[in-house]
């Protein structure tokens, strides 16, 4: 966490940027896009919706030498505001600039009783880690449930500064976050190692089940703690959800909502990317069985990320309670997924990010690919999420051109459904 201090010049810069964000958020276009997302997330018919999340490509759009603030906190907030401005003035997709400036709780969370040492990973690069579980018989008993300790004083101070600096222009909101995914497998693999975890499914099946049971119970205890201490906040606005959707919905919170946020008032997200090569039967036995008690707590649910769901594991996906959005990864069969998802759920299409990784994109190829996919998915509630970009060819025009091409093609799609 950056030190909570800003220079006078930082404050002036941030106020100017916040004013620009406010002006964008008040535009008619943002209200129109917001209404599209409300309809889309309620499974009403709209054209396909388009979102571009540049990922590591943001470092090529908003570079360090462009930032004007001097303090660490100022540069963090400046980056956040400049992203909103880029989205609102240049990107051209369906992202909604909603005039909210989120401030997170400041907290520390312990690990699972064993240290997972990471090697590498600087600047978003590749990394590996040293898995601490060497022997199930000796090490399983060392596991402990994570504990969260919130620094309420620092959190309050951070919110106060944000309100003083930005509050005249933006709605400053304290927002909690339970993490990217509650999917369990990533934790298990960090504790045991990727290849070894796969071998364990054959060699130590009972031990794997004990591990997954422990992780499941730990995640459930975490959610209990967040609920009981009012550390959850609604995610039904322009937040990034799951593997890329946006949260606007009138179905959440629940009708009996009184102000204290519960998991059933939220969108939930679950995935199991790392087990894409595991058989559907083993996936059900060693993964899905332990995921289900977690995801069934949420009011609306999203399932999947980069794993393909077009094999036999599909039969499990519709059993998820309150399921609303399903990820269709670059490795999934688009046609098979269209036949299965139909108009029952949101078809969250993830195209390959590689076309944006070159200095100059092939616009004709991008357009043809999108036309083909839109034709295949007629009859589905489609959103196209460009994400996982490690580079955009050092050319910010790539994301702008992709967004405009995608939106142009989406607007040609007939609302008459098959």
Image: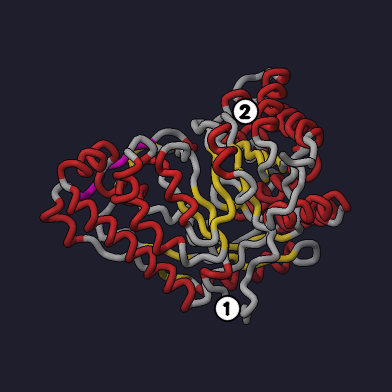
Q: Residue at x 65, y 19 (%)?
A: 359
Magenta range is 127-133
The quadrant of the rendering that contains the C terminus is: top right
Colour convention: secondary structure
Label for residue 260?
Answer: 1
Secondary structure, mark 2, is loop
Counting from the top left corner in percent of width and height, residue 374 is at: 69, 32
Looking at the picture, tell me which residue is in the foreground, 225 or 14. 225
- Tell me if residue 362 comes above or below residue 217 in the rendering: above
Counting from the top left corner in percent of width and height, residue 96 is at: 74, 51
Q: Residue at x 49, y 52 (%)?
A: 318
Looking at the picture, tell me which residue is in the foreground, 7 or 248. 248
Label for residue 392?
Answer: 2
Of the image marks 1 and 2, the number of the one nearer the N terminus: 1
Q: Residue at x 24, y 46 (%)?
A: 192
Labels 1, 2: front one: 1
Looking at the picture, tell me which residue is in the foreground, 254 or 190. 254
Residue 53 shown left or right of residue 114 in the figure = right
């Amino acid at each position: 966490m950056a030190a909570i201090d800003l220079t006078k010049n930082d404050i002036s810069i941030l106020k100017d940027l916040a004013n620009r964000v406010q002006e964008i958020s008040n535009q008619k276009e943002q209200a129109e896009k917001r209404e599209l997302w409300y309809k889309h997330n309620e499974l009403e018919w709209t054209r396909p919706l388009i979102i571009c999340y540049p990922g590591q490509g943001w470092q090529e759009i908003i570079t360090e030498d462009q930032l004007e603030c001097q303090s660490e906190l100022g540069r963090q907030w400046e980056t956040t505001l400049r992203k909103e401005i880029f989205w609102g003035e240049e990107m051209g997709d369906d992202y909604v600039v909603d005039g909210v400036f989120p401030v997170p709780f400041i907290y520390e969370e312990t690990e699972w009783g064993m240290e997972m040492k990471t090697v590498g990973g600087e600047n978003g690069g590749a990394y590996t880690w040293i898995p601490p579980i060497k022997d199930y018989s000796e090490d399983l008993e060392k596991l402990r449930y994570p504990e969260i300790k919130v620094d309420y004083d620092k959190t309050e101070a951070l919110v106060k500064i944000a309100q003083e600096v930005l509050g005249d222009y933006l709605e400053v909101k304290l927002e909690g976050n339970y993490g990217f995914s509650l999917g369990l497998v990533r934790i298990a693999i960090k504790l045991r190692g990727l290849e070894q975890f796969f071998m364990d499914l054959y060699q130590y099946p009972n031990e794997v089940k004990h591990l997954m049971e422990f992780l499941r119970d730990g995640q459930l205890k975490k959610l209990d703690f967040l609920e009981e201490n009012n550390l959850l906040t609604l995610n039904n606005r322009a937040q990034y959800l799951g593997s890329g959707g946006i949260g606007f919905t009138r179905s959440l919170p629940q009708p009996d909502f009184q102000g204290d946020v519960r998991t059933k008032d939220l969108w939930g997200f679950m995935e199991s990317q790392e087990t894409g090569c595991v058989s559907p039967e083993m996936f059900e036995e060693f993964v899905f069985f332990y995921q289900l008690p977690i995801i069934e707590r949420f009011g609306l649910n999203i399932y999947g990320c980069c794993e393909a769901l077009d094999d036999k594991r599909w039969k499990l996906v519709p059993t998820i309670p309150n399921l609303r959005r399903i990820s269709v990864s670059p490795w999934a069969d688009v046609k098979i997924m269209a036949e299965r998802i139909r108009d029952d759920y949101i078809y969250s299409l993830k195209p390959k990010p590689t076309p944006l990784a070159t200095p100059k994109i092939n616009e004709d190829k991008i357009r043809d690919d999108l036309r083909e996919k839109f034709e295949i998915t007629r009859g589905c509630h489609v959103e196209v999420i460009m994400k996982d970009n490690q580079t955009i060819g050092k050319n910010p025009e790539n994301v702008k051109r992709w967004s405009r091409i995608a939106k142009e093609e989406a607007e040609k799609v007939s609302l008459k459904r098959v």
